[in-house]
Amino acid sequence: MIASRPPWDNSRMPQFDKLNDDVDCDVLVIGGGITGLSTAYLLKQTGQRVCLLERDRLAHGDTGCTTAHLAFVTDIRLPSLQRTFGSDRARLAWQGGEAAINTIEQIVDQEEIDCCFHRIPGFLQASLELNRDETQELQEECNLAQELGFAASFQATSPFSGQPAIRYANQAKFDPLRYLAALAKAIPGDGSAIYEESAATDFSADPLEAKANGHRINCHHLVIASHVPLMGQIGFFNATLLQSKLAAYSTYAIGTKVPAARYDEASYWDTSNPYYYLRIDHHADYDYAIFGGKDHRTGAASDNRERFDALAEILHKFIPEARVDRQWSGQVIETNDGLPYIGQTAERQFVATGFGGNGMTFGTLAAMLACDWVLGAKNLWQDLLSVDRKPVTHAVDYVQENLSYPYHIVADRFQRSEARSTREVKRGEGKLLRRDGQVIACSRDETGKLSQVSAVCTHMGCLVHWNNAEHTWDCPCHGSRFQPSGDVLAGPAEEPLAQIKNQREAAVK
Ligand code: FES
């Protein structure tokens, strides 16, 4: 039996009631992942009254699916970062990751959190799938890292793959849910509170307010930490402009026991595009490997499950005895220039998004920035990561990155039925059906229960696609994800897929 969740024990997360009354607070934080919880925790330490709203359960979304590498080495390779931003800003970006890891370490010490936080090295190794000599390229990259002041060393052979690699000292790893459970427990009290199953809606600017479960939350500052940002009070146009600089990718991970002490306890990632990543944890009588990659634009894969098989095939080349006992997927948000967008988007409104594969470190850095923003303090990274920073010369053209939107909006008009009747939708399957001029997202769970909702994404109208690994409806345009019931799992969509009035099981043309 293969588990469909990462190894982190989510039973440790404390649970909180729904919002059931009006609330006044200093700061309203939206999102109960690492960014929201860290922001609320840091602000509470400064005496602010914080209200944190989570649509579902804390750390239930992409934070719960992380592989929890703590690395200051960014997804965007250092030479590219330097070409795009210059040496000083490239150094500053990595120093931001260092500061975030140091902050996590301080909180772990201060709160005495038993979350297996360890400093480990990270290895950038030559591609696991390309058979070419990358020695010179990696040596030059290592030299650049050293020039910028980072503890990097070139190794002719990576401890995992035997390929050339750069060893970066002072990365780290932890159990993210044990860490976040401790933060969540420290937030309530003295005017601060957490509410779960409380989706924020109906934002207004003056007074600054939102609603959840029909109740009003009045605040002085609003921090949107919802992975893909909600619109908040910036309006559809500006929200869409920000969205057009972001691209959602699905990523896949598998877990397996490996023989004890065969590999160094470390993080590994390679130069493939998209890259493969590996975390090795040592246990008393075995080691555990988490191996991931095979990313694609969310909603754009025809068969999600085959990504797990492809990962297992590559891992078996290095660990023939690996027996996969876990597999899961998550979503990462990439930006046009490789660095996240963190900062003010409207008066008294702050947003953090676009962390790529560095969700734990950039999420923590975002919390540090949000805290300084609320307190009116200057922060070293505020200009570098600002939401309205100027486009930079070597950035990916974000118009091109989002070309899929006009393509899909046209192609969707010619979408054919994937089944003639709901009877053709088997257990565990989802198919699009045309009926009475509507396209219906029809799925059947393992018990045989049928769900039928509109297939039209409530963000900007593309048709959703079935994800056969996660059993969700994913939108290929900007990455929104929905449950079979139509409820939103991940934005930018904020409204559920529309319910279908006529739920008959009839044959269709
Ligand atoms: Fe934008 Fe679906 S149309 S996420």
Image: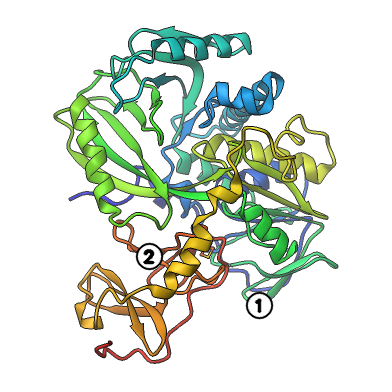
Choose top left, top right, bottom left or bottom right for residue 136: top left
Is residue 291 shown left or right of residue 395?
left
Is residue 344 shown left or right of residue 288?
right
| Dot in front, 1 or 2 | 2
* Residue at (61% x, 9% y) in the render: 147
Above or below residue 21? Residue 328 is: above
Q: Amino acid at mark 2?
A: His
* Residue at (48% x, 25% y) in the render: 172
The residue where tag 1 is placed is 214
Is any part of residue 188 visible from this angle?
Answer: no
Q: Is mark 2 within 8 Å of ligand 1?
A: no
Asked whether the beta carbons under mark 1 and mark 2 sit within 8 Å of each other, the answer is no
Q: Earlier in the sequence, mark 1 or mark 2?
A: 1
* Residue at (73% x, 45% y) in the render: 343
Above or below residue 461? Residue 164 is: above
Q: Position of residue 132 (x, y in %)?
A: 32, 18
Query: What is the basis of the colouring in this image?
Result: rainbow
Whole-angstrom CA distance, mark 1 to mark 2, is 32 Å
Element at label 1: loop
Q: Amino acid at mark 1?
A: Gly
Mark 1, Cα crowd under 10 Å, few <14 / some 14-19 / many 20+, is some
Q: Position of residue 143 (x, y in %)?
A: 54, 8
Pick whichever, 361 or 473, lies toward us: 473
Q: Position of residue 122 (x, y in %)?
A: 44, 21
Label placed on residue 312 = none
Q: Position of residue 467 (x, y in %)?
A: 34, 60
* Residue at (36% x, 7% y) in the render: 156
The residue where tag 2 is placed is 465
